Image (cartoon, coloured by chain):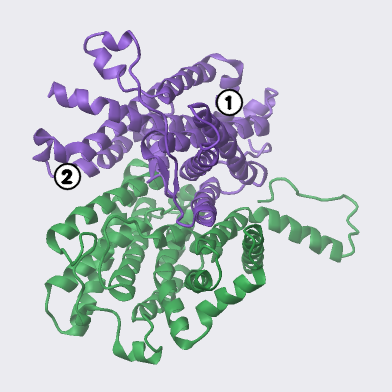
Chain colours: A purple, B green
Amino acid sequence: MWAIIEQIFPYAIVFTIPLLITALGGLFSERSGIVNIGLEGLMISGAFASAITVNFLQDSMSGSAVLWIGLLVAVVVGILFSLLHAFASINLSADQVISGTAINMIAMALTVFLARNITGSGNIRITSGFTPFDVPILSQIPIIGDLLFTKTYATTWFILVVLLVSAFILNKTKFGLRLKSCGEFPQAAQAAGINVVRIRYIGVMISGALSGLGGAIIILTYAGEFTGSVSGLGFLALASLIFGQWRPLGILGATLFFGFASTIANVSQVIPELAVIPPIILKIFPYVVTLIALVIFSKSSQAPKAAGEPFDPGKR
Amino acid sequence: MRNTIVSLISIILGLIAGGLLMLFIGASPIEGYTYLFQGALKNISRIGDTLATATPLIFTGLAVAFAFRTGLFNIGAAGQMLIGGLCATAVGLTFDLSRPILLLAMIAAGILGGGLWAFIPGYFKARFNVHEVVSTIMMNWIAYWTVYYTVPAYFKGGTETESQLISETASLKTPVLSEMFQGSYINLGIFLAIIAVIIIAFIINKTTLGFELKAVGFNRHAAEYAGMKVNRNIILSMIISGALAGLGGVALYTGNASSIQIGILPSQGYDGIAVALLGANSPVGVFFAALLFGILYSGTGFMNAMIEIPPELANTIIAIIIYFAATSVLIHRVLNKFRKTRSNANDVNGPVGKKGEA
């Protein structure tokens, strides 16, 4: 049993990280009061941007610098794309769910359209992504050394830092508290002198940046090729956000759950102990659990109260 | 009337954006659109294909629009289609009945399957106030994996990724239609779709049920105060919506195609949202929006064959149309301004009601 866990752990973490960072992005957006169902599309745009950047630069540059540039470009593209959602839902008071759906559709279609035009097949390959490494010294620690510090990616540590910083920003800084107030009671926030429109723009842009990063990490760590989708991970991130009850650490727990459940389902056929369980049970397990969790949490939901509502300063 | 104008403007803006995209990749938009419309409408067989392409979209568009009317966002039409299609295919492959009875049984199976798949999120919404967007997405993936393992286990076909082909008796395709449209894959699904449009329009506009569903959509609390059974209406609305999507699955898998594919969520489910939105959630609007999308989808294949424009152009145009439809406030504002300047602009107070008019 222990051997299985030891085997699965690094893969589960790798799968968790893009989910985690995307859900974290969604957290900033929803806490500011804007429901962002477009996470999937923002991830795709980031995945596309990083794949195309690395694909262009990998011949002329070498080393991991090119990969970090790819991540940076993904962040920028994610932000630009999220502005479409911000403009529609903040300035035009559009239905946020519909606007987010439009973002998803635009990203899914436009990226494949462009990719097909550039490469012909619609897929963009990168020759080398981030390589896993063992953290020196720490990986020698018994038990947790094997679990947490072997075969790790640089991006994993980077994202964990982002998580800690985000938790700090949301709970301890002036900006974080203002952001949350805009998601709970924007009229009161405005009366207190907070620029609700500006804060919400920043919230949505952060979600674009982090989702773009999430999509790029998929390509640059385990996928290695852009194929026009992120297989519903954006929606899974949305579910993790609710599962995690709109709190950074809750999200960490929820995404780890999804990461492990998916990895177990993926590797079940090669591990004799798991092969006895019908694969369909393992595959639908995370989704069924999410549904059950939604029912359980429904009574005590911590959802931002004003999320999804267009801001109307005149409303009492 | 207003909605129609907004939809038409969105379409025109979307097509312009598509033209700009063609320019961007160095193709001629005029040539591109000529081939696109030729590909969809050039001869009777292509028109048949276009109608067939539009058929599942009519169903999913109706499904999303119907739920919208009750204030529900059914993003799970894809999963409901899959289950509806799976049930219909299962009936079609298992039973050996006379053609009319078999087809009716398949249609009933599709309705039941889709309805059941939407009942669960509907019940969760009514009973526990679980947001239907997330629960229907979860149901989509459960449907995806259910089909993924059920089809190879029980209805394995020639390849690993699809079911057995259904027999001609179990197919919605009829020789009469195929001949009339010169070998097109148009089938009885289009008639089912037209019947569905009429029935749904009747339910929404002329029945007490429709009135109550709309009332719940406008204001849940007011409807409750007026003595309507809000929870029952929410569940019912989701079931009908899911049944429509299930029918879409029947039309797609036993009409347009002859087998069910695994490992893919039908894109028509997601496109249904676009269809509903462009059709302003009215059944007739949905019908025409689906036809337009049918033209775009079936025309881009021909366009791609004639000049080097990727067929994803159709999806891109549709997505941009939806963005404009979603931001229709902007179009409303421009229309208002236009109307004001036309009526001599003797409005000394300047633009009134700029904020909050949506």
Task: Say which quarter of the image contains residue B175.
Answer: bottom left
Residue drawn at (35%, 49%) of the image: B136
Q: CA distance from mark 1 to mark 2?
A: 43 Å
To the question of a shared chain for discs 1 and 2, the answer is yes
SS category of the residue bearing label 1: helix
Q: Is residue A165 above or below residue A281?
A: above
Q: Which residue position holds label 1?
A: A179
Q: Residue B295 placed where, x, y %? A: 51, 73
| Residue A304 vs residue B264, the one in the foreground | B264
In the rendered image, which residue does mark 2 sit on? A279
Q: Where residue B129 sits in the image (x, y, percent)?
A: 37, 42
Q: Nearer the viewer, residue B241 or A119?
A: A119
Query: On the rendered structure, is B350 left or right of B230?
Result: right
Horizontally, is B83 left or right of A226 in the view?
Answer: left
Residue B77 drawn at (x, y percent): 37, 58
Please tell me which residue is depicted at 30% across the width and 82% down the height of the picture: B173
Residue type for callout 1: Leu
